[in-house]
Image (spheres, grey):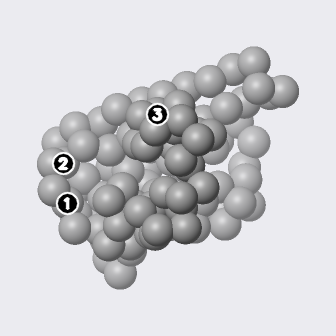
Amino acid sequence: MGYEDLGFCRKGEGGKFIENGESDFGGKIPVNTFGGLKAKGHPLAATGVAMVYEVVKQLREEAGRLQVDLKNYTGLTHNVGGTGHFAWVFVLRR
């Protein structure tokens, strides 16, 4: 649903987007290249900062083996907090 809501694919096509590998390394829009917030232990209240940190590393081309091929030097973070009543989206550009 997040991919659809962010406009990465049409409504109802999020599953196909994932199945086709569009969010994987080498895909149309690589997502969670660092493993996602659960890979970081999901540090409550620090998750947004962790996400921005990872995007900045990508934009600076400092992500090492997790570096994706940058095409337009734009990164995005999307986080939903609490019981879903808070949402943040940051668009970062180099």
Mark 3 Cα-neighbour bin, 10 Å: few <14, some 14–19, many ≥20: few
Question: Which is more foreground, mark 3 or mark 2?
Answer: 3
Mark 1 Cα-neighbour bin, 10 Å: few <14, some 14–19, many ≥20: few
| Amino acid beneath label 2 | Tyr
Figure quadrant of residue 2:
top right
Q: Taking 40 as reference, is 49 left or right?
A: left
Identify the residue under disc 1. Answer: 70
Q: Taking 43 as reference, is 71 left or right?
A: left
Identify the residue under disc 3. Answer: 6
Mark number displayed over residue 12: none
Q: Nearer the viewer, residue 59 or 30?
A: 30
Q: Earlier in the sequence, mark 1 or mark 3?
A: 3
Identify the residue under disc 2. Answer: 73
| Amino acid beneath label 1 | Leu
Q: For the point 15% across and 48% down, which residue is it?
A: 72
Marks 2 and 1 in Cβ contact (< 8 Å) = yes
On the question of residue 18 being in view, the answer is yes
Q: Earlier in the sequence, mark 3 or mark 2?
A: 3
